[in-house]
Every structure is written in structure tokens, then in C-alpha cells.
Image (cartoon, coloured by chain):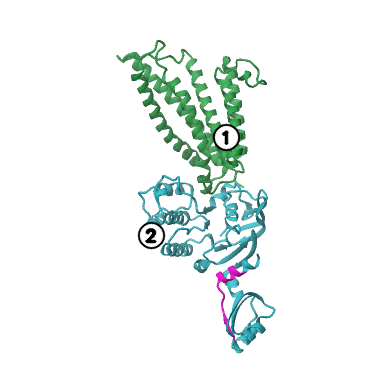
Amino acid sequence: MNGKIDFHNITLRFKKFEALKDISFSLDTGKIHGLIGRNGAGKTSLLSLLAAFRETTDGQITIDGEPIFENPDKMQQILFVYDKSYAEEYDKIPAMLEFVERHRPYYDKEYADYLVKRFKLPLDKSVNKLSKGMQSAMNAVIGLASRAPITIFDEAYLGMDAPTREIFYQEILADQSEHPRTFILSTHLVSEMDYLFDNVVIINQGRLVLNEDYETLTARGASITGAAEQVDDFTSGMKILNEQKLGGTKKVMVYGVPDEQRLSAASQQGLDIGPVSLQDLFIHLTEEEQ
Amino acid sequence: MKKTKVNPKVVSDIFYEQFKWSLWFLCILVAIHIVVLFFFPNSEAGIVNFFEFSSYSTAVFMLVCGIMAVYVFFTSHVQQGVTRKEVYLGVVIGAFGLALFLTLVPLVVNGVEFLLAEYTALPFTFTSIGSGSEWLVEAIFYLLNILTYYLVGWLIGVGYYRFGWIIGFLFIAAAILALSLNDYFLKDDNISSAIPWIPDIQVYASTPAAIAGSLVLIAVLLAVMRLLTKRMAIKMYAN
């Protein structure tokens, strides 16, 4: 499958403010990529560049080696779903979907109808009258049913209640298994969405922190719990993300996997080795950068 | 890289949307003219014919359509993977189609009014557009005039869309200049007293010169609009 995305030394400046600083990385095709970063990290800026909504100040984004900006073939492959204001949108959902269907070659109408029912979206109300959550669900329908080879959801869940978000996530996974494409999901609801990701990109303050396979990344972190002294001995020299102490017991989160031998030695010493969630890694990796 | 061509879907989207607005506009305009017919008695010269009556309102309607064009058509289309160039071409062709439609309808309504005045007992007389080929020249002037108003509206719209309120005012100034030139070519306006470097000749008096001048103005506006929208950032939020 084609569609490899390359970001080559991307810089984006607004007057004096540098939103993105010399970012380079690649995204493989056919995977679900999680783009995570704190508020103002530059997630939306980065995605708006990929969607060709604006031009980079420096650097270039390519798909299969071709620059995307004003490239009709490439722009057609990308769909950017974001928290758009529908305050002035007097059309109803069917008209909105027809417009998308008209311009999206892989749009699946049956699937869209199914999703509209699944999200219980009203067809007879104008879009500006819908609740925020329903507008977001409509965005989700647009993004899913378009089957654009590169589908970007930028915090597309805003306003959705928990059950609706769950449906949204289920549908992403279900459709991905039947019609594989590249998804980019930007979020700060990391703990809720981490099981969706094949790959994780973390950015912070306009810089790339990491771009790694989800399994590799989470396997890199470990939490070590045990008697304070033993834990300190064991973790000395490791990159410590966080420490918590309760009485004589200490829990330390480390990044950068200790090798198997050390881990089994630790277990023998009675230390408890546990996994670290992506959420924890995210919090501590981006905190440290400050 | 595939070259951008005219995207017929985009052209028809843009034309059709504005066509719908123009139907509302025309209905209201015809209604107002009918009210004028019945409530304001014939003056000696006759009632202003629909063609003449509509000319100023149609120009303003086109100006408003032009102002809205960037807001209504750019964001929505680029979000669906359409390039700026395709949207640009769509807006240009759509504007031309709309201008043609809004020239033909007043001509037809005007013809119907004349026939009614001629062959029915209705007590109306209308001013005449002109005899022989004069009406054709009037129609061409009408078309060029409203097309220019659309492009000027588009210029103002993009100025505000891209640069916000303060620099937007500069675009209003540019718009006033463009419309003054437009009047200089197509109307009996003498702007050389206001703008000293414009030669004091009656361009309007010579049809070919007026049409040529107006076409040059339109070409300049088209070029400026392409430059302004070519690499324009698409606004994600309404503010």
C-alpha cells in the first residue's frame, strides 16, 4: 500500500512565534498513529500542514516522495477532521454528507448511513442546532465513511460522551481491519485511546519528542516497586521519570529498558517490576522537557 | 505531479450555490418592481425599465456574493481535498456564469414588461433601453459591470479573511479605486477631477475603449485574486 508520509525538517512560524521547530519523521502507511502532546504543543499546527491548510515556513511534507501542498492527487488522499465551528451551518446532516460524498472518491454511503444510525444522529435538524457532541459524531461519520487513505482526527471526540467515544473507537478499529488505511489520531485523552495506537508520536513545545512503535515504546518504560533502598540501588544510573514514596516502600518509573538479566535479578531481590502506561510516559516525558 | 485542471464538480458547486441565492434576490427585485409599477404612477418619461432598475441592486448583490466567496467556498472545499487553484477556477467560472445569468434575466424580464405594456391594456409605459444594437452594448456593459463588482467583493473578502480588520481597510480602499475605474470605463463618470493622473477623456463615449478598459481591469483583478489565494492559509476557525 502506498502513502508513506515524510516530514522533512518542518518549521512553522507565525510572525515571531515558532510553532514547530525543525521536525522530521516518517509515518508508515496502513497504521493507526497516535499524535500526542500537551496543549499548545503544536499538534493541530502539524496536522494542518499535513492537510495542506497552510504552507510550511521551512521544510516539506511529502507522500510517497511527492510534495503535498496544492497537489491535487495527494490532497485528495488526505482528510482532516477537526473541531470545526458549525455555528453558521444551516444545512442538515444529509446535505453535509452529500457534499463529502461528491468530493471523496472512496466514500461509502452505506457505511455512512450505518454510522449515522449507530451514533443516533438526527437527520432533520440543521447542523448548527446540534449539540457539540453530535456535531463531533457527525465529524466522525465524515472521517470514517470517506475512507480517505490518510484520515486525520484532531481531537475529534470533543463533546462526545463516554459511550459515544467508545463507539467511535470501536468503529475505527473495526473499519481499520476491513479497510486498512492510515489514521492519525491526535489526542490528550491518552489513557482512553492508547489501545488504538500502532505507533505513537509525541511532540512537545513544537519539537518531536519521539516517534515509535507502541509496543516498543511501552516496553521501554518500567515501574520498579520495593524497599526504598533496594529500588534506589537498582535504578541508579537509569532515566527516572517519576518517584513515589510511601513509608519504606518506593515506586520508581524508569525509561529505557533495563536488560533481561537485570530485570530477573531485580525480581529475585523481591522488587516488583510492572509496566508503565503510555499516559504516564507521556506525562513525564513532556514534563521533563520544560 | 498531476496538473490541476478545472474541476467541474467544484465549478458546479459554486455556481449552483450562488444561483440559489440569486433566485431569491431576483424574486425580491421583481416583487419590488411590481410594487413600484402599481403604487408610483407613470411619470412623463415612463417607468424606469426593469433592466435599468435592476442594475445597481444586481451590482451590490454581486459585490456581496464576492465578499462571501472566500468564506463559503475555500474552507469547505480545501477540507475535502480540493486545491486552492481548483477553488479559484471554480469561483472565477462560477462568477462569470452568475454574471451572465444575472444579465440575461433582467433582459428577459424587461422584454416581458415591454410586451405587456405593448399588447395588454395595462396602463404602463417604460423607458427604453435603446434601439437597434444599443441594447446589446448596454447588456455587455451590464455584464462587465456586475462581474467587476463580484471580483471587487472577492478582493475585499480575501483581504479580511487573510489579514483581518485593520489591513482589511486597505482592501476597501483598493476596492473603491477599482470601482472608480470601473465607473470611469462603463459609466458616464468623470473621475479625472478626483484622481489627477487619470486622463480627462470620455472613455464611456467610445464603446470599444470602454470595453477594453473594463476587460483590462477584470484581468488585473483576476491576476491579483490568484496571487492572493495561491498559497493562502485556510482558516480553521471562524474567528
> In which quadrant will I find the C terminus of chain A?
bottom right
| Image location of residue B37, percent across then percent down | 36, 19
Work out whether A279 lies above or below B238: below
Q: Which chain is green?
A: B
| Image location of residue A135, percent across then percent down | 43, 53
C-alpha span from label 1 to label 2: 44 Å
Rendered shade, chain A:
cyan
- Which residue reaches farthest left? B121
Q: Which mark is residue A118?
A: 2
Q: Which mark is residue B155?
A: 1
Badge 2 element: helix
| Three-letter amino acid code of the residue under disc 2 | Arg
| Three-letter amino acid code of the residue under disc 1 | Leu
Contact flag, marks 1 and 2 (Cβ < 8 Å): no
| Image location of residue A182, percent across then percent down | 54, 60
Residue bounds of the magenta highlight: A271-284
Q: Chain of mark 1?
A: B
Work out whether B80 lies above or below A42: above
